[in-house]
Amino acid sequence: MQNKPSFVLRNPSANKGTGFNDEERNKLALKGLLPPKVETLQEQSDRALSQFTSFTNNLEKYIFLNCLRDRNETLFYYLLMNNLELMFPIIYTPTVGEACQKFGNEFRFAQGMYFATQDKGSIRSMMDNWPADGVDIIVVSDGSRILGLGDLGTNGMGIPVGKLQLYVAGAGFHPTRTLPVIIDAGTNTKKYLEDKYYLGERHTRVADDQYYPLVDEFLQAAFDKWPNVLVQFEDISNDHCFKLLDDYRDKFLCFNDDIQGTGSVILSGFINSVRAVQKPITEQRMVFLGAGSAGIGVADCIMSLFEEAGVSKEQARKSFWFVDSKGLITTTRGDTLTPQKRAYAREDYDYQLKSLLEVVRDVKPTALIGLSGIGASFTQEIIEEMSKHVEKPIIFALSNPTTNAECTAEQAYQWTDGRCIFASGSPFKPVEYKNHTFVPGQGNNMYIFPGLGLGAHLCRSKHVTDAMIITAAKTLSKFVDDSEVVTGKIYPGLQHIREISTKIAVRVIEKAYEEGMAQLTPRPTDIEAFVRMNQYNPSYDQKFNN
Ligand SMILES: O=C([O-])CC(=O)C(=O)O
Ligand SMILES: [Mg+2]
């Protein structure tokens, strides 16, 4: 059967289903294998949309979409790109979180590749099993910190899969040239180790002397097989993610989305918040709840605004207060801090503040940034306390999925009497409050990574630099104009994601040439035209025409 031309019906990249015209049906021996009517992509998409909307449960919608992708990739991306606002919350946060938690139960077919501890020594040869001709981008996770949901082991595969779907829809990477990867180093979540449907290796996480060599072998193999690939590290726990980024960012073309992608998107939102509240960065007092990959990544990015304002690093650090499970992070509280926490630990406190509420009372912040992974940690008391001292509080409840958001959009607007600038990591619907409709922003790295990745890949950048990450943030911030910013809107609408990603890719490429990172020669004369020419758009036109 595999040798018959009609096998195209079982190949999602080639399949057009009822979209095969009479000529193709003759040529590919499909006569009689399809109902008589030849349909356009639009007609197929209308049907698929009505099927999608007939499900009332989001997980079912997720399964429907991923099964569609496994039947007809072109139709899937056409449908997705024409219904972004409806479908991103399904293939991505929040529903992808639930899909990961139930990954073993809902498993239907494999996507991507798995490299487990038992595969040590054979990863390079296993990569030859990947059926596609080439790979431009890999998203890799070890499942150790999936969104704010913790250690999900191999169940985390939903995240690389979802992120890559955004790379395709958002930026125009070619779907067949994307590779989701899970490194299976075990899981410390007992529930999964005891779950008969769990699909990973059944042991607790291996120690560092096994973990790092496994990741190293994977990276060496990936860049050996696909020298121009870009690797995105995703949802890797704090104990490993910083070291991995440090070790490899100057060796390979790679970045960490949770540190750098989140850093960039929140920098962008912060630039626009500063425009909205009309108070310069030097007058901002920022309290962060959560000092993990995202919190530190965001602070590092926001530091660049101080630098531009001519403020020294030492001075700038005094505008940041970090709170973790033990309270305000200080050099004097008596515990050993990770290097990342140490960088932002306050040296000027001879007293201890043990809770976020105490910190908010003491600091009187202008901005409260939640990247803690702990839902409902911005309580009414905390938000009301904050709003006593600031006219337009900046409140970012960024943890994912929605159940982990530090507060809801509705709570933030109510508890600040409609005065706050609000953003969340997962989407919230517009809120009606006192005859006004507030549209919350989604400060999610999805606005950044597709364009950043496309730019870095297309110009064959050696590395992903800080300057590219900051350029990406600034490019995004310009998609919101002054008249919108004054209404509290700090992120553009999701429907513009292709345009945003295209512009980000252009700026990243320009930066890469400026910094001597781009290896593509000659430099394209019209970079925007070059980017557009290389973007995937779902269509049947290009297939089977020769
Ligand atoms: O996936 C998302 O929505 C954003 C993200 O990287 C995370 O929460 O880890
Ligand atoms: Mg992530």
Image (cartoon, grey):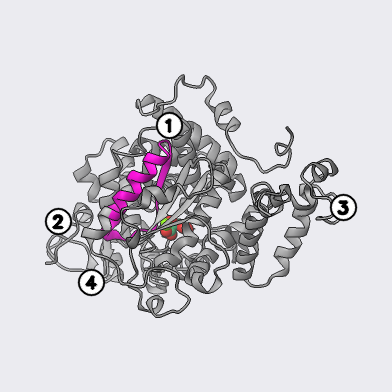
Q: Nearer the viewer, residue 446 or 389?
A: 446
Amino acid bearing label 1: Arg
The residue positioned 50% from the left and 40% from the top of the image is 134
Q: Nearer the viewer, mark 1 or mark 4?
A: 1
The quadrant of the image that shows the C terminus is top right
Label 4: how many Cα within 10 Å (few below 14, some 14–19, many 20+): some
For marks 2 and 3 on the same chain, the one whose residue lies earlier in the sequence? 3
Label of residue 354 in the image: 4
Q: Residue 226: percent from the left, percent from the top?
A: 43, 39
Is residue 420 something that shows in the picture?
no
Q: CA distance from mark 4 to mark 3?
A: 68 Å
Label 1: how many Cα within 10 Å (few below 14, some 14–19, many 20+): many
Label 3 element class: loop
Report which residue position mark 3 lands on: 37
Label 3: how many Cα within 10 Å (few below 14, some 14–19, many 20+): few
For marks 4 and 3 on the same chain, the one whose residue lies earlier in the sequence? 3
Label 2: how many Cα within 10 Å (few below 14, some 14–19, many 20+): few
Report which residue position mark 2 lands on: 347
Which segment is the magenta one? 214-242
Q: Are marks 4 and 3 in contact (CB under 8 Å)?
A: no
Q: CA distance from mark 3 to mark 1?
A: 44 Å
Label of residue 299 in the image: none
Q: Are marks 2 and 4 in contact (CB under 8 Å)?
A: no
Residue 188 falls in image quadrant: bottom left
Label 4 element class: loop
Q: Is residue 227 magenta?
A: yes
Q: Is residue 82 magenta?
A: no
